[in-house]
Image: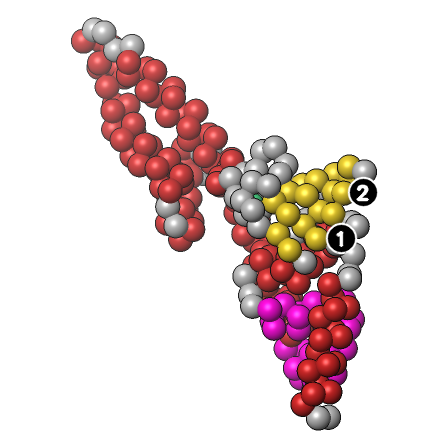
Amino acid sequence: MRKIEMDLAYFNITEQLKTLPIDEVWRRYINNDLRRCGNRWITRCPWHGGPDGDRNPSLVIYTHSNRWHCFGCGQGGSTIDLAMKAFNIDFKEAVQIMAADFGIMIIGSTPEERAEARRKGLFAKAKRELEARFKVKEGEAYQRLASLYRAVDQTLAEIKTEEDLELFGGLYHIATPLEHVLEVLRTGTPAERFAVLGDKQVRRWCGWA
Ligand SMILES: [Zn+2]
């Protein structure tokens, strides 16, 4: 096939991908957490809000224009932009994965290339699911550690007598590391947060061990 024909075929495929129902693409790549609201869907944005998440759903999916937009972080776009964002991949990879997932043949691609795109898609999806589960776990950990910290802090503030100090003074050794863990969960990189949640002591504080 000549170059210009290839380009045209590729353009046709990207146009087809942009017309895939956006809510279907969302369900396939993100989650089923969509609430219908007239001719649009509302959902929580997975990309902003920190460990607590986007509590008041600020992401809107428009069926008439087949586009999405988050009023919290300003991200949005077409179905292809959604796949790019979901898997953190570039345009070309997103087109390949979507074409494989939604059964649209990329003209000129070999069976091997299609199998490779499919494999990448499955891998990226598994990675995303794992990250989503980690996020839930992390939110849960944050809530528990924060309330533990409040309890410790309150108890320490109420220490008045020698006897109190003897009974509760040991809590001073918990307050500082707890504070540090909360700080990491609020501001750390994903790797740092992951490491902190794997810590034995932290797992005990969360009641997981
Ligand atoms: Zn957002």
Q: Is residue 207 above or below residue 4?
A: above
Q: Which residue is depicted at the point 66% across and 63% down?
A: 80
From the Cβ of disc 2, is ligand 1 less than 8 Å away?
A: no
Residue located farthest toward the top when viewing the structure as drawn: 161
Q: Position of residue 53 (x, y in %)?
A: 54, 38
Q: Position of residue 196 (x, y in %)?
A: 38, 45
Neighbour tally class for label 2: few under 14, some 14-19, many 20 plus, Cα within 10 Å: few
Is residue 208 one of those drawn in magenta? no
Q: Residue at x 69, y 87 (%)?
A: 4
Residues in magenta, as a range? 91-116
Residue kind at label 1, given as amino acid type = Ser
The earlier-in-sequence mark between 1 and 2 is 2
Mark closer to the observer (1, 2): 1
Residue at 67% in and 90% down: 3
Magenta highlight: main SS: helix
Q: Amino acid at mark 2?
A: Asn
Q: CA distance from mark 1 to mark 2?
A: 10 Å
Element type where label 2 sits in the image: loop
What residue does disc 2 label? 39
Q: Is residue 100 above or below residue 35?
A: below
Please check the rendered image and state whether residue 92 is part of the magenta-colored stretch, yes or no.
yes
| Residue nearest the observer in this picture, 205 or 95 | 95
Q: In which quadrant will I find the N terminus? A: bottom right
- The answer to whether one can see residue 157 in this image is yes
> Which type of secondary structure does the marked residue at label 1 adopt?
loop
Residue 129, placed above or below residue 54: below
Ligand 1, seen in the image, is in the quarter at: top right
Q: Nearer the viewer, residue 40 or 24?
A: 40
Q: Quadrant of residue 204?
A: top left
Which label number is shown at residue 65? 1
Q: Residue at x 64, y 55 (%)?
A: 77
The C terminus: image quadrant: top left
